[in-house]
Image (cartoon, rainbow, N blue to C red):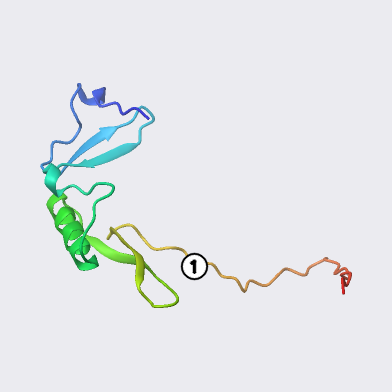
Amino acid sequence: MELNDTQSGGAPTDKSQHHQLLISPGGTKYWIPQCEDALKPHNGQRFRALSEAVEFYQLYASTVGFDVRHSTLVKAQRDKTILWKYLVCSREGYKQRVNTCQPVPTENRVRRRRVSNR
């Protein structure tokens, strides 16, 4: 996908110190955080402890102008060690709960006998 920043005369549409706004040809807005490269997270980055990673990401978020919150946490079943943890933007929203106990409408519906396979 190629971004088009010429819609505002060849320059990004927002000159905030924390982010840059680019608008794609389809009209989608992309907010690109602006900060020092040392503060930006990158693939393969490793930390000695989970708490160090959380502190790093919270520092990055506050530097570029957003807040984070803790989201999904997955633990191993045997020893309860943390396998992974998600930190997300505080404005992300929440997962919609799935109601698995919805009644099936029975109006004008014929129930057919199921064949036993025993």
Say what amino acid the circle numbered 1 marks.
Arg
Residue 58 image offset from top left, x and y in percent: 18, 60
User: Mark 1 Cα within 10 Å, few/some/many (few <14, many 20+)?
Assistant: few
Of 33 and 21, the residue lying toward us = 33
Of 16 and 68, the residue lying toward us = 68
- The quadrant of the image that shows the N terminus is top left
According to the image, label 1 marks what residue? Answer: 97
Which residue is found at the position 13% from the left and 40% from the top? 16
**Left or right of residue 7, residue 106 in this image:** right
Residue 68 image offset from top left, x and y in percent: 24, 60
Which residue is found at the position 77% from the left and 70% from the top? 106
**Left or right of residue 14, residue 81 in this image:** right
Q: Is residue 90 above or below residue 6?
A: below
Of 51 and 63, the residue lying toward us = 51
Residue 13 image offset from top left, x and y in percent: 20, 32
Which residue is found at the position 17% from the left and 58% from the top? 56
Q: Is residue 9 above or below residue 20?
A: above
- The quadrant of the image that shows the C terminus is bottom right
Q: Residue furthest bottom?
A: 79
**Left or right of residue 22, residue 76 in this image:** right
Residue 87 image offset from top left, x and y in percent: 29, 61
